[in-house]
Amino acid sequence: MYAIVEINGQQFKAEEGKKLFVNHIKDAEEGKTVEFDKVLLVDNNGAVTVGAPTVNGAKVVAEVVAPLVKGDKVIVFKMKRRKDYRKKNGHRTHFTQVEIKSINA
């Protein structure tokens, strides 16, 4: 059984026991459970339920493993040739690691 769920504007495939890195969730504490109710699709052993836009009464329950995880460094380099213009910038995206506990559909 799996579900497609929207978390902070991104879609993820959620299966029980699977760990996901999602965009940083504010107010997340380690060990705390989080519920996601924007379930777009549920597959229960071949029986597919597609929401319009979401599946009614479905939710995904997850536990926060790590509230703040920094991603890999991303370098942003801008340059215009022959104009003496160069900008070097970068960032590390913040994630929250969650483990899917159950899918209720």
Image (cartoon, grey):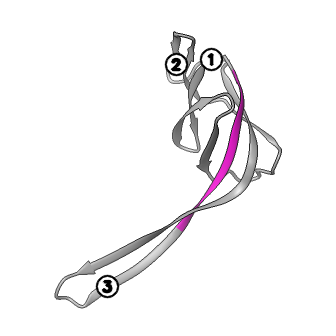
The residue at which mark 1 appears reads as 56
The amino acid at mark 1 is Asn
Quarter containing the C terminus? top right
SS for callout 3: strand
**Relative to 20, is 36 above or below?**
above
SS for callout 2: loop
The image position of residue 89, as x and y in percent, is: 44, 77
- Region rendered in magenta: 92-103
Quarter containing the N terminus? top right
The residue at which mark 3 appears reads as 86
Label 1–label 2 contact, CB within 8 A: yes
Whether residue 23 appears in magenta in the rendering, the answer is no
The residue at which mark 2 appears reads as 51
Q: Which label sits in the foreground, 3 or 1?
A: 3
The image position of residue 55, as x and y in percent, is: 58, 19
Mark found first going from the N terminus, 2 or 3 = 2
Left or right, 61 with respect to 2, comes to right
Mark found first going from the N terminus, 1 or 2 = 2
The amino acid at mark 2 is Gly
